[in-house]
Image (cartoon, rainbow, N blue to C red):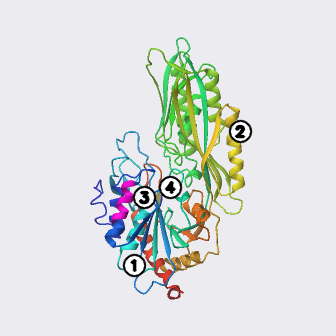
Amino acid sequence: MGLVSHHDAYADLEPRSVWQYFAEIAAIPRPSKHEERVRAYVREVAQRQGFGVREDQVGNLVIEVPPTEGRGSEPVTVLQAHLDMVCEKNAASRHDFTHDGMRLIVDGDSSSEERIVRADGTTLGADNGIGVALALAAATSRDVIHGPLDLLFTVDEEEGMCGAKALSAAFFRGRRLLNLDSEEEGTLYIGCAGGCDLNLTWTLDAVPLLHNAEVCRVSITGLRGGHSGVDIHEGRGNAIKLLARTLLREDRHSLQLMDVSGGSKRNAIPREATAVFASSAGSHEMLRKAGADVTLEAMGESFEPDVAVRIERVRTDATPVGIGASDTERVLAALASLPSGVLGMHPKVAGLVETSNNISTIMAKAQGSHIVIDLGMLPRSSSASRMRDSLDQLGALGRLTGAKVSTGNAYPGWSPDPDSPTLAICRRVHQQLFGVEPKIASIHAGLECGIIGERVGNMDMVSLGPTIRGAHSPNERVYVPSVERTWRYLVALLMALVQPAATS
């Protein structure tokens, strides 16, 4: 199998309609906050079918799909997915997410030998393009029996769930919702974690470098990265934490940080980070040894086979500056002290992460006579009190090192309802179709269901979807057989929702 264009990627994949929609969506650039082109595509599909289209003030869309003949008296079912995608790429990739569509590869999974679809050096956008494709295929396929449908397509999910936060109860008709943004076939999600952006900002004096200082760059590359919610329990390496660990092996009393950057998305575990610093003569050789040690540690701790810690000398301009040694030590102390990973497991649900934090991004920029360092984090929790406690803890650590602390983009969790009538139908159909009970779970990630439930009220919701691995990283891949089974399940489920007696 090899690289194929988006026109051919779905040619021999089933179900044909789902893959055709997905390939067409994948060809459209759709970063968060820039969904204009994919919204236009969805409107065009709906208008070709004669469906009603509504758009709210932030760009969320509702497609009103009439019922199959004879099913007009049934309650409205909402099929919900988000239009934007996480835009992550390998360092060597020249992909421009604002102009380029995804280059799809139909491949084989190295462990299971199942067919997968992935992208060429970038995130794929199956999160949540495959959910949009499933919804459009269900609405437009003549052989799918369903009651009245509202296809709810939200915007800006990946950078704060801003689309869902703007929803009103009057925007769509249904109060029974199937969210198509889950990534584990055979699992029905009925709860999720809430989250909140947390930022630490240091504004530090820019000072001349020490006399005869040696300037070096430390680069961390090759980590797996991944979704800061669903992959956080795997203990994957965090490039920003490894960067700090490497620098702390140096003589802290002479180290002057000149520049630092790492990570690119709040909800992605950072795969790469780099820092430029000045130190006393001989630091290059000392840090080469430290880099080799940290590389081996990362391989052993989090099984990162491709991690690389590189140290190189760099040339500087005529008047280089950095922050002072004491300020550098304070920032590195913060990076060492701030937790990143699982903070607590759910006390009653085995294997479920309750609370976590992801150190997501770091960036330095010059501002007049200062260097400003911004550190972004995303703590999550399914417990409101644990979330408050985490924000207090992380903020206190920041303030102790002189940082300004700010928060934003908070969103609620979704409290599970095991007695949901929609869940009961979903379980029954899964058992009849596949011969096994589905797993019922909550997810340690943000689903829009929590916000929709809070904004709209009285919602009966279940989340489902095909198996996707490596979301929020260039390793993202969706499993072709899982998409086919999820499609069959969705078709059977839509029929059961209008014919519950036929499946009992």
Sequence-earlier tag: 3 or 1 = 3
User: In this rendering, which labeled residue sits more in front, label 4 or label 1?
Assistant: 4
Most foreground residue, 327 or 347: 327
Residue picked out by circle 4: 157
- At mark 2, the secondary structure is helix
Query: What amino acid does circle 4 point to?
Result: Glu
Residue 242: x %, y % from top left: 56, 36
Residue 272: x %, y % from top left: 48, 39
User: In this rendering, which labeled residue sits more in front, label 2 or label 3?
Assistant: 2
Residue picked out by circle 2: 396
Seen in the picture, residue 242 relative to 33 is either above or below; the reply is: above
Using the numbered discs, state the Cα–Cα distance from disc 3 to disc 1 in whole angstroms: 23 Å
Sequence-earlier tag: 4 or 2 = 4
Q: Please tell me the numbered disc located at residue 126.
A: 3
User: In this rendering, which labeled residue sits more in front, label 3 or label 1?
Assistant: 1
Query: What amino acid does circle 2 point to?
Result: Ala
Q: Residue at x 37, y 63 (%)?
A: 42
Residue 74 in view of the camera: yes
Using the numbered discs, state the Cα–Cα distance from disc 2 to disc 3 in whole angstroms: 38 Å
The quadrant of the image that shows the N terminus is: bottom left
Instruction: Residue 414: say if magenta.
Output: no
Residue picked out by circle 1: 144
Horizontal arrangement in the rendering, residue 20 relative to residue 156 (left or right)? left
Using the numbered discs, state the Cα–Cα distance from disc 1 to disc 2 in whole angstroms: 55 Å
Sort mark 4 into few (<14), some (14-19) or many (20+) by Cα contacts within 10 Å. many
